Image (cartoon, coloured by chain):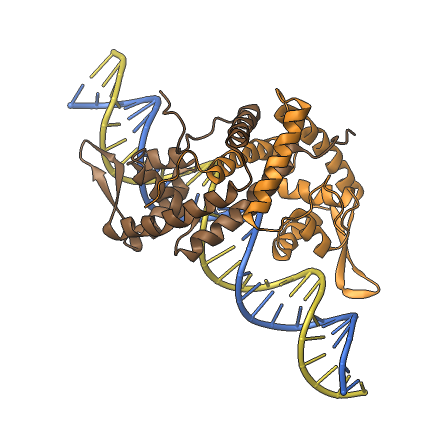
Chain colours: A brown, B orange, C yellow, D blue
Amino acid sequence: MPAPRGMPIGLRLAGVARDVGRAFDDTLAAAGGSRPLWMVLLALKSGAAASQQQIADHIGIRGATLTHHLAGMEARGLVVRTREPGDRRTQVVRLTDEGERMFGAMAEAAHEFDQRLRAGFTKAELSHLDLFLRRLQENAGVRGAALPGDATPP
Amino acid sequence: MPAPRGMPIGLRLAGVARDVGRAFDDTLAAAGGSRPLWMVLLALKSGAAASQQQIADHIGIRGATLTHHLAGMEARGLVVRTREPGDRRTQVVRLTDEGERMFGAMAEAAHEFDQRLRAGFTKAELSHLDLFLRRLQENAGVRGAALPGDATPP
DNA sequence: GCCTAATCGTTTGACATCTATTGATTAGAG
DNA sequence: CTCTAATCAATAGATGTCAAACGATTAGGC
């Protein structure tokens, strides 16, 4: 059977993402939140998403998963869900004042983490890394969710 | 509060890894397996790990998680766990013939997937990508598990 | 030999995620 | 207006993962 020559790039990616993700989880936990919570807050604050459907698409998770997260966040007083008047299937999600404060606390932590990740990278290297990652995503053949900073899809 | 300038690199990494991982999961599922199962088989076949402790360290998951995976694999007849004679705390894990066959089926699928991921990359680019990913891992400050292809740690 | 600390694997419970299904609502055709 | 198909969110169950706690075993000091 074929033995992969050199390190399978997918394994490297998964391993690094796991480790970086764990560190980020710890960072967000220290700020009182969690990664799913941060992603929801970020989607709402960025204005890229307002309905549950949009948030789930934006983050790249399933609607069922988001329902669970929002249930917890609403119970915690961070968001409020209301039915959209023109289409009662749709739940619109809005941040509460407490949610705004939570975002602020986590945004600072997230920014510092990002700066930390960038240590030792030149602008050109970051640009190349971004390009490489996108190419991997395309090669995998899965159409990923739009992420903050991506050009708005048509 | 500081707004991250440009796309946070950690989010890009997490998003791409999620998408690539999902595609890999689908690939392995089509071959009759799953990613955790593949990682365990790979660790055993590579000779890098024999005890549960070693496998968990090698893959980068907790011992509790591995216990669950191995329970399923043993029930499926893919592995056999035995107590090491010189230290009865330690479980040694061995592949069965069925486990060998499963590995063969999945190795081919994994190899093709890896080739697919590498499409459009030059050797130099792959080398740079590997370097960048390792740097991210170091920057995150989490000592990751040794992965197949890494130099053996002292 | 006795005791304490460390190690290994297992069990329990919680979190995040997905698939499949369901109920409510809306869209579109006739 | 009626009916079918599509959409949105919620529910239930399964998978993968982790932390904490536990029991069994080993290591090391006295």
Q: Residue at x 28, y 36 (%)?
A: A50
* Residue D29, position as x, y percentages in the image: 76, 81
Q: Give the camera-side residue of C27 and B133.
A: B133
Q: Is residue A27 left or right of residue A141?
A: left
Tell me the quarter of the picture where residue B136 sits: top right
Give me the residue at 30% from left, 54% from top. A75
Rendered-image quadrant of the C terminus of chain A = top left
In the rendered image, residue B21, in percent from the top left (x then y), is placed at 56, 35
Task: Answer above or below: position of B45 versus A98.
Answer: above
Asked whether D21 or A48 is in front, the reply is: A48
Picture mark count: 0
Residue at left offset 59%, top offset 44%: B137
Residue B76, how many percent across, how many down? Answer: 69, 46
Image coords of residue D27 (percent x, y)? 78, 71
Locate the N terminus of chain A and report the quarter of the image it occupies: top right
Residue A61 visible, this orientation: yes
Q: Residue at x 39, y 53 (%)?
A: A33
Q: Is residue D5 above or below residue B75?
A: above
The residue sitting at the right extreme is B85
